Image (spheres, rainbow, N blue to C red):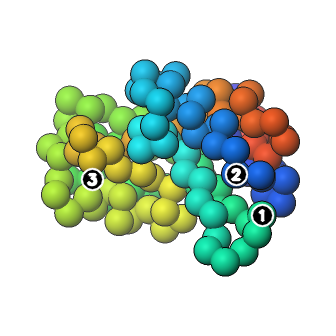
């Protein structure tokens, strides 16, 4: 059974970035939101409104179809697997541009996409049950 991260209580997000930092620490050994596979942004001029972007786990991922080297491979049950050795660090970031929900961040340092592996660490560190790892 495949598991995917889902945003289940968007209105509960307080913008603490615990999910973002947990992801960056776990997968990139970094303490910066720039290295996270999840993106949290505040809506300008609106108190308490946040946008949470996580990989939707598309069954036919646009990001994978856009990759010229097949570094992004569709994962059974949704999402993609990233094979970094195949990535050619495209300057125009076709994989990121192809992601309709804008849920594929780009690492400006390595010039590679930051691909969610749907591990659930972000959900484990969310204090308000905004995110959940669910079976699909």
> Residue 135's image quarter?
top right
The residue under the point 79% across, 46% down is: 130
Q: Which residue is mark 2?
A: 15
Q: CA distance from mark 2 to mark 3?
A: 32 Å
- Asked if the residues shown at circle 2 and circle 1 are in contact, with their CB atoms under 8 angstroms apart, the answer is yes
Q: In the image, is 132 to the left or to the right of 29?
A: right
Q: Earlier in the sequence, mark 2 or mark 3?
A: 2
Q: Estimate the x, y position of residue 61 in percent, counting from the top left.
A: 46, 55
Q: Secondary structure at mark 3?
A: loop
Q: Estimate the x, y position of residue 108 in percent, counting from the top left.
A: 27, 47
Q: Earlier in the sequence, mark 3 or mark 1?
A: 1
> Residue 92's image quarter?
bottom left
- Asked if the residues shown at circle 3 and circle 1 are in contact, with their CB atoms under 8 angstroms apart, the answer is no
Q: Which residue is mark 3?
A: 67
Q: Estimate the x, y position of residue 16 in percent, counting from the top left.
A: 70, 44
Instruction: Please name which of the two marks, 2 or 3, marks the residue nearer to the observer.
Output: 2
Q: CA distance from mark 2 to mark 1?
A: 8 Å
Question: Looking at the figure, which quarter contains the C terminus?
Answer: top right
Question: Looking at the figure, which quarter contains the N terminus?
Answer: top right
Instruction: Please name which of the two marks, 3 or 1, marks the residue nearer to the observer.
Output: 1
The residue under the point 51% across, 56% down is: 103
For disc 1, the neighbor class at 10 Å (few under 14, some 14 to 19, many from 20) is few
The residue under the point 23% across, 38% down is: 110
Q: Secondary structure at mark 1?
A: loop
Please state which of residues 82 and 27 is positioned toward the viewer in this rendering. 27
């Amino acid at each position: 059974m495949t598991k995917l991260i889902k945003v289940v209580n968007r209105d509960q997000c307080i913008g603490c970035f615990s999910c973002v930092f947990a992801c960056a620490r776990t997968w990139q050994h970094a303490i910066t939101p720039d290295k996270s596979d999840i993106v949290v942004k505040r809506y300008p001029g609106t108190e308490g409104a946040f946008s949470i972007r996580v990989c939707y786990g598309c069954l036919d991922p646009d990001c994978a179809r856009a990759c010229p080297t097949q570094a992004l491979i569709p994962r059974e049950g949704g999402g993609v697997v990233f094979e970094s050795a195949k990535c050619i660090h495209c300057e125009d970031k076709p994989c990121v541009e192809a992601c309709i929900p804008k849920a594929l961040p780009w690492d400006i340092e390595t010039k590679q996409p930051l691909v969610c592996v749907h591990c659930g660490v972000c959900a484990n560190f969310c204090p308000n049950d905004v995110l959940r790892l669910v079976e699909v």
